Amino acid sequence: MIYFLYGDQDKARGKMHELVESMQKKQPDATLIKVNSETWRSDILDELLGTQGLFYNKLIIEMDQLLKNKEVKEAVLENLKEIQASQNIFIFLEETID
């Protein structure tokens, strides 16, 4: 599942936190993973697509401001169908889109 939030960073980030909080209330055993420019690795997307939580099947994955990186953008676009079909929840937060 994919959620894509963009625009004014204060508002979009606030919406992301509300969304994550709501999901965690519904699925308290889901694991939250935060990925940003500091934690990104070239193999992390494959890892997240193939991983499930230890105690609960779903992961909630925050992808924070990553699509401005060309490598990340290409990896996401190449795996878009897999991301959509994944049991994990991907939340992308971006300032702008192209």
Image (cartoon, rainbow, N blue to C red):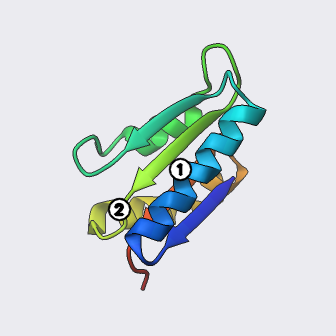
Q: Residue drawn at (69%, 41%), measured in percent from left and top? A: 23
Q: Is residue 79 above or below residue 10?
A: above
Instruction: Estimate the x, y position of residue 55 in percent, counting from the top left.
Output: 66, 13
Quadrant of the frame with the C terminus: bottom left
Residue 79 visible within the image:
no
Q: Is residue 86 above or below residue 78?
A: above
SS at mark 2? loop
* Residue 40 found in image quarter: top left
Most extreme residue toward the top, as rendered?
55
SS at mark 1? helix
Residue highlighted by disc 2 = 65
Q: Residue drawn at (69%, 25%), measured in percent from left and top? A: 28
Residue 28 visible within the image:
yes
Residue highlighted by disc 1 = 17
Most extreme residue toward the right, as rendered?
26
| Type of amino acid at the residue the image marks with label 2 | Gln
Q: Which mark is residue 88?
A: none
| Type of amino acid at the residue the image marks with label 1 | His
Left or right: residue 71 compared with residue 78: left
Q: Around disc 2, counting alpha carbons within 10 Å, would you say few (fewer than 14), some (14 to 19), or many (20 or more)?
A: some
Question: Mark 1, mark 2: which one is toward the viewer?
Answer: 1
Left or right: residue 39 compared with residue 43: left
Q: Is residue 18 above or below residue 81?
A: above
Q: Residue drawn at (39%, 66%), measured in percent from left and top? A: 74
Q: CA distance from mark 1 to mark 2?
A: 15 Å
Instruction: Estimate the x, y position of residue 86 in percent, counting from the top left.
Output: 68, 45
* Residue 38 found in image quarter: top left
Q: Is residue 9 above or below residue 86?
A: below
